[in-house]
Image: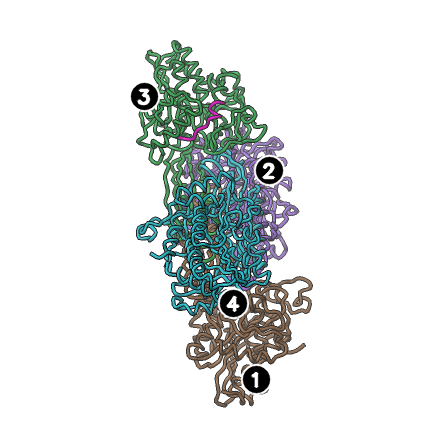
Chain colours: A green, B cyan, C brown, D purple
C-alpha cells in the first residue's frame, strides 16, 4: 500500500469534526517535521481564535481532545504542540527569491456515523471510523494525505525550486471560521498563487469519474449557517392544550416553508434545514425546538434574496404560533471564483498527466468551500488562485455516510500540484 | 413545616423519571418500614418485569440508578432492597376479616428541566430539582407524600380497621407499563375497592382550585405512545440534492398532518407529536428523523379512528418521500371510568371535610392515567373504584416546568382517603 | 304520498341557497295563504336588509331569482310578493288573550351538487335537485314541510287555541344573517315561547335514528365565517420565480396551520377551512388566493381563543410570504342553549307520541344554528325556548351530497310541535 | 404610430387564450391576404385537431369564439375561414429554387385579468384588454405584430429572394399542443431553417434590456402540465368530522410538498402548482379539490426525476388522507436547443443592426417554449434552427399582469429576421 493510501486510511479511521482535529493536526505536524519542512506552525500560530465566537475551545474541550488524540496513538510531543487547538502550516523556504504559493488541505470530518455494512471497503479492510458520530464522507482524509504526499515531493526536490510554499492544513471546513481564522491571521497576505483540490466534483453537471479532472470552478456559493430556536410554552396536550405554544409544530411549518422558497433565476442558490431537535416526551406540548439551517447563493443579490426569504419565514412562523425565536449565527462563508489565468496553467499541466484521460477546463462546485475566503484574499492583492476538482469513482455521493472512492486519484492530484508548482516556482520556470 | 410538605419537597427535589425511581422507592420503603407497615415489597416483587419490552432495566442502568440514589442520600439498606427496580407496595393487615382496599400513588417525574426563575417557590425555598432534565410537574411528588401520610394515619389507628389495605407506590405513570406491570403481577386480583387521587383536575371543564374536589372521573382516554423513525438517504444538499431522501421534511410534513386530524364527534380524542429529532449538521440532507407521538380516545371506536388516521399519515408520508419508516410501540394504556357507587361514597365523606368548600360529583380528567388499568381489573371481578380529583391553586398548568401548587390540599386528600377507608373498613362500618 | 312528503320532495327538487329562496318563499307564502293563515308577510317585511352587508340583493340578482322561481313553477302573484327577497312569516291570531309562540323553519340549501348515483332515492324517484350546485343536504326541505304541516293542523283547530303563533320561514341559515335579520326586525321581541326542530342530531354523541328524539340541546357553538384573500405577486415560475409572491402556497400553509390549532379543553370549538380558490394556469406563480373559513366555540372564552389563533396564523402567514391579506367578514352567529323548563315541557309531550320509542332529554348539536340568535332574544326578555332534535335513519351524514332520510319522522315532528303548542296555548292549558 | 405598434396594440386589446384565438387568426389571415401572400391557410389546415385530446373545440365553443370575433370587429369572411379553429400559416413562394424557411409567431394570451391601474400605459392609452380574464403578459401580441411586419417586408422584396418562407402563426403556446399539432400536420417536414423570436429573455441570467439581444438559447426545459383532483368525502365539520375526507387539506399538503422537491444538480428543473380550487362553503368538509401543476426539466433524466417525485407526492398524499386522486394530462412539451451554426448566422446579422448595442451569443430561456417541438423536427432531418431573444425594457417580469415593454424592439426584430432570411435565401446569398 502506498504512502498516500496509508495516510488516507489512518485519517479515515480517526475522523475528527471541525475544531477538534487534534490527533490529525499532531500527526500532520509530526510528518511535516520528520520530512524536514523548514517551519511548522501549530494551533493558535495558524488560526486566529479571537474570531471564533460560538466555537467551544474551552480548556475542558481542549483537554478532552488532547486526551483522545493521545489515546488514539498520536505522538505526545506533537499533541502538546497543538495546545488543543487544531490547524497546521508547514512553510518550505527555498531561500531563493521567487513567488509565494499557498496550498490548502482541509482536515475535518462530518458529524455523523459511518456506514457499517458488510461489503463497504472501510469495514472490510479495517479502516472504518472508530469515532462514533464522526465520518470522513467529504474526502478531507484524502486531501490531507495529498498535502503530505506533496510535502514529501517538494522536500525531495527542494533545491530545484525558488520562492516559498505554504502548506496549510485547515480545520473546520464543514462548519465555520476554518479558512477565515487563517486569513485573519494574515497567512494569505503575501501569497502570489493559491491552489486547493477537492475530490468528486462535477463538470457539465456530471460527477467527475476516475481519470478526469477540472482545472477550476467559478460557481462557489456563499453559505451562512444558523441555528434557530423557537420558544413556545409547555402544557399538557389534553388537560390544557390551549395554554400550550407548540414549538415543534412551528419548526415543522417553518421547515416546510423554507424548503418551498422559490429559486432565484439569476444563478445558484439553496436552502437546507439539516437538523431539527425538540421535545422530550409525547405527553407534553413541545415548548422549545431548534432547526439548523443554511442558505447559499452564487451572487450577493441571490444570497440577499434567500436571507430575506428565510427571515420572513422565521418571523412569520413566530407570529403564527405567538412565540419568539432566537438564533445562533455561525457566520457566512463567501462566494468566489477561480482565476482563468490559473485555470489555464492548471490545464496545461493536467494534459501532461496520463492518469487524466479527460480534462475539463471548468467544473462545477455547485456548493460552498471556505477556500473561497483564502482565494478572495489572494485575489484582492493581485494574486491568482484556483480550486481544482480531481475525478474519482465513488460508492456514494458526497456527504453520504457510505462515501468511499478510488484512492488512485490521490497520486494524480499530488503529481498535478507538483507540476503546477514546478512550472510557477521551478528554477527553470519562466517567472 | 408539616410532614406532608416535607415529604413532597424532598421528592420534588430528587425527581426520577419512569423506571428510574430508585431513590424515591428506597425512601418510601424506608418510611413504610419505620411506620411498622406489616409487609413492604420492593421492585420485582411489585412489578412484572417480563412485561417490560423496550424498557431499559439492564444491570448497567440499575447500577447507575442505585449509585445515584445513594449519592442523593437514600438509605443503603433500602436502596439495596429495590434491586435497582422501582415500585413499592406496603400491605397493612388488620388480621380481622374485611374487605381488601388498594390505593395507588404514582412516583415518577417528567423528563425535562424545571423552571429556574426567581420568584418560583421551589427555587426560592431550595427544593427545585437537582436532577437535570427531570421535574415533578404533574404532582406525583404530592401523591407520594399523600400515600405516606395516609400510611401513618392508618398505622396509628390500625386496631379500629378490618380487612387489608394495599398502598401501591407505582413507577412509570408518565411512560408505560407502570400500572400494567403491577396488574400483571396479580396484586389487584383480590381487591374489593380501589382509589387513586390526582391534583389539579377539572370539573365542568374548569381547573379545580383550592377548596374544591371531584369524587371521580369517567372520561379516561386510552393512550398509545409510539416513536416513529423515517429512514431517508443522506446527500450533499447542493452537490447531489436529487439523491437525498429528506427524513426531516418527512417528519415535518407528518407532524403537520398529524396535528390536522379531524376530531371525532362522538367523544374525546387527541393526537400529540411531542418530540422530533433528526440531523446533525446543516450541510447534509437529513437521512433519519424520529417523531414521538401519542394518540388517545375516550372509546374504542375513537381510538381506532385515530389509529387508522395516524397510520394512514405515516404510510402516506413514507410514500411521498419514497422512504420507509419503522416504529417502537410503547404500548397502550386503557380507557376507564370511576364507579358511580364509589363516587357516591366519596361524595358523602368529602362533604364532611371543611377544607372542601365545593364538592363536584363528577370531574374531568380529559386525559389518560394508567390507574385505569388497575380500576378495570378491580371492576372485572366485581370491585368498585374511583379516581378522585383534589383541587388546588397552581402557578401553571400541569406538565409546565413551572408547575407548583397549594400544598395545603395534601392534608385534605389524606383526610378524605382515611374517611372513605374508615367508612368501608372501619370496625363500625356497615359492611 | 302524504302532504309532508309531497312538500319535502318539491322543496328538495328546487333547492335554493341562502338569500336566493324565492321559489321556496313564494310557495310557502302561497300555501299559508291558501290555508287561511291570518297574516302572511314576505321578504323585507320579514327580514331587515339594512343588516345584510356583503349579501347580494341587487336588483339584477333579484330579477334573476324571480325569473328562476317563475320558470320553476312558482305562482306569479306570490313570486311578486317576495319582491325578490326571501323570508316568509305566517301569523295565526286566535283573537283570544294568550301567549305568543314563534317557530322557526329554515329554507335554504347548501351550495353544491347533489349525488346523482343510481340507487339514491331522489334520483330513483325523480326529486333530485334540478338546480346545479344546490342541494338540500341539511334537512331544511323537511323543516319547511314540517312548518307547513303544522300550519294546516293549527288552522284546522284554530278555535281551540289562545294567543298568537308566528310561523317563521327563515332564509339563509347556512350562510349568514338569516336569523339575525329577522331578530333585527323585532319579530321576536314579543315572543313568550320559541321552538325550532332539526333532523338528524345526536344524543350521547350518537346520531339519533328513527323513533328517537331529544328535547333540546344546550351546546350551540358560535360560528364566524370569513373569506380571506392573500395578495401576492404574479411572475413566471422559471423566468423570474424570485419576483413572485406565491399566494397559493400562503393559503396552503395557512390551511395546514389552521387545521392544526389545538383544541380548547374547556369545551367545544372547531375551525374549518371549507373552500380554497386561486390561480388560473400552471405557468404563473399564483398572485391571489382565497380561503373561506369558519371558527366556532361553545363559550366566549373559547371563541376568543380560536379567533386569536386564527388571526395569528393569518398575520404570520402574510409575514412569511411578504404579502398582505384582506378578508370579508360574514358575521358571527351566537352560541346559545335551550331552557330546561321548555325541554321538560317537550319531554312530557314527546313521551305521549308512540313514534318516539326513545326520548333523550338532552341531545347534542355540536355545532351552530342561528336559531340561537332568536332563542337569545326570547330568553333576554324572559321567554323560554328549545331547539328539538328529531331522530331519523339517514343514508349519509349531514352536509354530504348524498344525504337522504326516513321521511316518516316529519309526521312525528308535526305532532310534537302541535302537542307542545296545545299544552301551552290550548283553551285547556294550565296557563 | 408605426404599423408594428398599431398591430401590437390591437392584439393586446383583444387577447384570446389558447385555442380561442379566432379574432386574432382572422385578422392575421386578412392582413396576410391583403399583403398578397401566396397561400394563406387557416384552422384545421394548419393544426391537426386529431391530436387535441382534452381541448374543447366543440361546435358550441367554436360558435362562441366566432361570435366574439365578429363582435370585436374581425372581418366576417376571414372569421368564417377559420372555421372556429385558430392557427394561420402564410406561405411565400418565390418560385425560385432555394431553401425552405419557417418562422413561428405565437398568438395566445394568458388566462387572467390585466392590470387596471392608472399610469399603466395600456390603460392610459386605451389598449388595455377588453376581454375579462385575458391578458397579453408574455409578449405574444408583439410576436404576432413582428410576424406581420416581416410579411410586409418580404412581400415588398419578394423578387430578391429564392426558396419558400412559411410564416406560422401558432395558437396555444401557453397551454398545450399548439406547436405539436402543427408539427403533426407535417408543416415542418420540409423545412431547412427555422427561427422564432421572444421578447424579454435573459443572458448571463440577467433580463435583456432594450438595445440588447441573444442569438439563441440552448436551455429549453421540457414541461408537462397536469390537473390533479383529490376525491374526498363531504361531512359536517362539527357534526361528523370523522366521516369527512378533507380534499382541501390533501391539496394544501401536496402543494407544500411539491414546492419542497429538491432541485436536481445536473441542470434546470422546476415544479409549480399554479392553481387550486376546491370547496363551496365553510361549513362542509371539502370533498373535492383540484390543483393544476407543471414540472419541467432540462434533460430527460431531470424530467424523470421530477415526474417520479411529483407522483410519489400525489400517491402519498392520497394515502395520507385515505382518498383517491385522478388527473387530466395536458401533455408534455419537449426540451430542445438552438443550433450553434444558426446562432452564428444570427450573430453576424445582429451585429449589423445599430439598435442592438450589445449582442450576446447565447441567452437563457430558463423555461419552456413549444417552439422546441418545431425545432426538434427541423433538426431531425438535418435543418438548423434558433430561438432568438430580443431585449426590451419592461414594466414587470413576464407573466405579471402589468407587463408592458419598449415597443421599439419590434422594429429591430423584424429587421433581424429579414436580414437572416436575406442572407440565407437572398438572390445573392452564398447558398
Mark 1 against mark 4, which lies toward the viewer? 1
- Rounded to the nearest angstrom, the CA distance separating label 2 from label 4 is 68 Å
In the picture of the structure, the residue carrying the numbered disc 4 is C174
What SS does tag 1 mark? Answer: helix
Specify start and end residues of the magenta stretch as a single range.
A9-18
Q: Alpha carbon of mark 1 to alpha carbon of mark 2: how far?
A: 90 Å
Element at badge 2? strand
Q: Which residue is mark 2?
A: D93
Q: Which mark is residue C154?
A: 1
Q: Are marks 1 and 3 on the same chain?
A: no
Circles 1, 2 touching at the beta carbon (< 8 Å): no
User: Magenta segment: does it hold C189?
Assistant: no
Q: Position of residue C131 (x, y in %)?
A: 59, 66
Q: Which of pointers 1 and 4 lies earlier in the amino acid sequence? A: 1
Image height of C29 relative to D234, above or below: below
Front residue (pair D60, A350)? A350
**Which structural element holds mark 3?**
loop
Secondary structure at badge 4 equals loop
Mark 4 and mark 3: Cα distance apart in space = 79 Å
Amino acid at each position: 500500500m502506498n504512502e498516500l493510501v496509508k495516510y488516507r486510511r489512518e485519517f479515515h479511521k480517526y475522523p475528527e469534526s471541525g475544531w477538534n482535529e487534534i490527533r490529525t493536526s499532531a500527526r500532520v505536524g509530526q510528518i511535516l517535521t520528520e520530512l524536514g519542512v523548514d517551519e511548522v506552525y501549530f494551533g493558535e500560530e495558524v488560526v486566529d481564535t479571537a474570531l471564533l465566537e460560538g466555537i467551544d475551545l474551552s480548556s475542558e474541550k481542549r483537554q478532552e481532545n488532547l486526551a483522545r488524540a493521545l489515546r488514539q496513538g498520536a505522538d505526545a510531543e506533537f499533541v502538546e504542540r497543538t495546545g488543543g487547538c487544531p490547524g497546521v502550516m508547514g512553510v518550505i523556504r527555498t531561500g531563493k527569491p521567487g513567488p509565494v504559493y499557498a496550498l490548502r488541505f482541509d482536515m475535518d470530518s462530518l458529524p455523523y456515523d459511518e456506514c457499517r455494512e458488510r461489503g463497504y471497503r472501510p469495514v472490510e479492510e479495517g479502516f472504518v471510523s472508530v469515532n462514533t458520530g464522526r465520518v470522513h464522507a467529504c474526502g478531507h482524509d484524502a486531501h490531507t494525505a495529498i498535502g503530505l504526499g506533496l510535502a514529501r515531493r517538494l522536500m525531495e526536490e527542494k533545491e530545484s525550486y525558488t520562492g516559498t510554499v505554504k502548506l496549510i492544513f485547515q480545520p473546520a471546513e464543514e462548519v465555520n471560521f476554518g479558512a477565515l481564522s487563517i486569513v485573519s491571521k494574515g497567512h494569505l497576505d503575501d501569497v502570489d498563487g493559491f491552489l486547493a483540490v477537492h475530490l468528486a466534483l462535477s463538470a457539465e453537471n456530471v460527477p467527475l469519474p476516475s481519470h478526469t479532472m477540472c482545472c477550476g470552478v467559478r460557481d462557489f456559493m456563499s453559505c451562512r449557517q444558523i441555528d434557530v430556536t423557537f420558544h413556545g410554552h409547555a402544557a399538557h396536550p389534553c388537560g390544557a392544550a390551549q395554554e400550550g405554544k407548540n414549538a415543534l409544530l412551528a419548526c415543522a411549518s417553518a421547515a416546510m416553508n423554507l424548503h418551498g422558497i422559490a429559486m432565484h433565476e439569476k444563478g445558484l442558490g439553496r436552502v437546507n434545514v439539516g437538523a431539527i431537535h425538540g421535545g422530550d416526551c409525547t405527553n407534553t406540548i413541545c415548548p422549545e425546538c431548534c432547526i439548523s439551517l443554511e442558505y447559499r447563493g452564487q451572487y450577493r443579490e441571490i444570497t440577499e434574496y434567500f436571507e430575506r426569504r428565510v427571515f420572513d419565514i422565521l418571523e412569520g412562523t413566530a407570529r403564527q404560533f405567538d412565540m419568539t425565536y432566537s438564533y445562533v449565527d455561525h457566520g457566512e462563508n463567501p462566494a468566489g471564483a477561480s482565476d482563468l489565468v490559473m485555470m489555464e496553467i492548471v490545464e496545461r499541466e493536467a494534459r501532461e498527466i496520463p492518469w487524466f484521460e479527460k480534462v475539463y477546463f471548468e467544473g462545477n462546485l455547485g456548493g460552498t468551500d471556505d477556500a473561497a475566503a483564502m482565494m478572495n484574499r489572494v485575489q484582492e492583492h493581485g494574486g491568482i488562485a484556483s480550486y481544482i476538482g480531481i475525478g474519482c469513482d465513488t460508492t456514494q455521493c458526497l456527504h453520504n455516510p457510505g462515501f468511499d472512492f478510488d484512492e488512485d486519484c490521490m497520486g494524480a492530484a499530488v503529481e498535478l500540484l507538483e507540476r503546477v508548482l514546478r512550472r510557477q516556482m521551478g528554477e527553470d520556470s519562466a517567472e
